[in-house]
Image (cartoon, grey):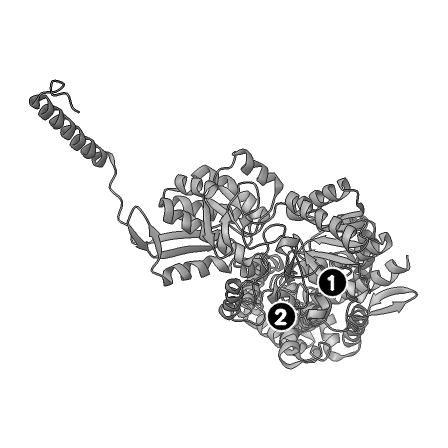
Amino acid sequence: MIGIIINGAILGAIFSLIAVGLNLQYGVTRILNIAHGEFLMLGSYITYIFFTLYGVNPLVSLVISGPIVFILGILIQIVVFRKLVHVSRSAEELESRSLLACFGLTFIIQNVVAEIFRGTPIISAPYLNVSTDILGEPVPLNMIVVAVMSVIISLVMYLVLRFTSIGLAMRATVEEPAGAQLVGINIFKIHAVSFGIGALLAALAGSMLVMIYSNITPYIGPQYTFIALAVIILGGMGSFIGSLVGGFLIGYVYYASLTIDALITLAVVYSFLIILLIIRPKGLFGR
Amino acid sequence: MLNKKAITKMQAVILIVIIAVAAVAGVAYYFMTQAPLPPKDKIVIGWVHGLTGYLQPQVETLHIYYKWIIEDYNATGGLYVPEYGKKLPLDYIEYDDESDIEKMLSLTEKLITEDKVDLLFAPCSTAFAYAAFPLYEQYHYPVIAVSFGSDESGQKMKTGEWQYSFSVLGFPGETGQEMTELFQHINSSIAPLNSAGIIYHADQHGTEYSNATNTYLTNAGFQVPVLQSYPPDIADFTPLINTLKDANVDVAIMFGYEGANFIRKCMALDYNPKLLFIGPSMETPFLVYTAFQFTHDDVKGVAFYDGWPSTAYTTPELAEWAEAHLARYGLPNAYPYPASATFYAALQCVFQAVEKVGLNREKIAEALRTETFDTIVGETKIRPGYSMQCELAGTITQWQGRNMMDVIWPLDAATGDIIYPKPEWPAG
């Protein structure tokens, strides 16, 4: 039981961080970025490059991978999605078009990375892979560090949204886009920054996951996108707190079912999700 | 002495004329009934595999020999085709199935019906090859699948239901038998070994190999208290490791592709069974030492269950091949894995069959079933429904602190002593 509590919390913290970025992007821009996992994968590869070539500590590389992917996210939002916002006649049209664009982005990013790393099909940057003890339960130190960092990053993100002017502008854009424009908020800038921050958060998660997992490939993204989608649907689309709570809930359900029978894990997670959606169709914190 | 009355001169002349006319008519008939050979300036080989998608890593490590052998033959002028009496250069058509089995099937059919390739190489992985075999049977294309192992299909090859489909690696039943014999030897000659725990990736490969191994081990009297599958993309091996730990098994066996994650977690949780069998993926030096960034000490004692045939690259010829492999791949630690040489040898068998019987695919299939070939692993025989039989190969390998794995079983093919129990994980 202690194992489930500790390990479930660790997985939950990681799942939350992955979901927070996606939820922010969707909440502000109404773009469901199903290429989210690809930005995570980019973070892993950037960390791998600096770890392998220059011996940079994966935790230090967060300050490299984050800004790089943040800028990339902003550029993609400006080049691809801003145009779609302009030409779409309704929110539904924007959502369907942007979904297609995200599909395209997924394949483009995957194939570019695969091409660059042709010959090196799998990467890893193992770090802090030693055991430590929590309440008598042996736990890998790197998982604890990643979980703690995930919580810290999520909290920082919460503080940014809650107490800074850019955070206020983002929340205003989520609540009332037209009203936000009327009070002088440049929502195009907010869209770009939000998309960039979402990409940044994914990249930070990816940078840390490559410390733990030795199976990172250019095609690893979708599995994390699915996790993030499950989390934000459970927590409520567009809800920051929902992402945090949803991440931990899925983490616990995932780990508990893994302990009972590994093969039924995904079935249990999605059954849990369906049941909760029947009870609360908009998710735990959705409005 | 000839009786002069037996035949007159006239009769002899008539007889000779009749024989001569019959011979000329026979030769004329033979040539008239033989279709003229179509002009041919090259041999085209086709294959479909995942250049993108989740199978790309396996394709990049397991299927590099497709192009290498073509380059090697072309460097010597091509492949000799007896009906043309000369060597023809080799060309190829390679399609990307994006790791999608349906796409692989439609592109394979395209290679056969539209591109009309002369020969086919197999797609990557057990599931994909298994799906493609019926097409080879339908269109009579002899194909040797290299990255493949399935008892179910092996049975079809043995019974002749499949006549054009061949395999290289150890089938699950063979692997289970080999591992059981190794465990019996360890138990009787080295140190006690009584139990094993098996975890496996829930796919055809994992299911077949784990079931066969479990059957052989339990029939031989070994305890197998853990037989547990896990899903693809598993996020954490901790519960499975705890299960193995609680069962206190002597040997932990993993049939799956997530070996690096599993070992890292074993190291972090300080779980060190007396023997660890892991694969596929943990047998490839490039992946182990470069991609996964393990050290020699990290993996020392970890074994791989290839079944037949695994090569240790200890003969001068194979050692030279291994060094050339490293140079040709061009990346650090890209030495061959245990089955590399036999994969290459399997392709040599196909080409040598062509050199013997020409491009007639019925004859090629027959040659593959019956002939013995001289390849880089010595005398080699393709045995329908069984693994490839090679002169210079063993069955089970183990990391022993070198750049490539050592063969440890059977003993007469061993290049290193069995390490049992495996050493502790290196500190921190």
Comparing B229 with B353, the one in front is: B353
Q: What's under tag 2, amino acid-wise?
A: Thr
Comparing B140 with B132, the one in front is: B140
The answer to whether residue B375 is seen in the rendering is: yes
Q: Is residue B415 above or below residue B104?
A: below
**Callouts 1 and 2 in the same chain:** yes
Q: Is residue B262 above or below residue B130?
A: below
Judging from the image, mark 2 belongs to the subunit labelled B
Can you give x and y, in whole percent of width and height, for residue A48 in the image? 65, 73
Can you give x and y, in whole percent of width and height, for residue A90 in the image? 60, 59
Can you give x and y, in whole percent of width and height, for residue B51 in the image? 52, 59
| Left or right, A258 with reference to B181 | right
Judging from the image, mark 1 belongs to the subunit labelled B
Callout count: 2
Looking at the rendered image, the quarter that the C terminus of chain A falls into is bottom right
**Label 2: few (<14), some (14–19) or many (≥20) C-alpha neighbours in 10 Å:** many
- Contact check, label 1 and label 2, Cβ < 8 Å: no
| Left or right, B395 with reference to A83 | right
Q: What's under tag 1, amino acid-wise?
A: Ile
Can you give x and y, in whole percent of width and height, for residue B121 in the image? 47, 50
Q: Which residue is mark 2?
A: B290
Disc number for residue A209: none
The kind of secondary structure element at disc 1 is helix
Q: Which residue is mark 1?
A: B263
Q: Residue at x 44, y 49 (%)?
A: B350
Q: Earlier in the sequence, mark 1 or mark 2?
A: 1
| Left or right, B321 with reference to B220 | left
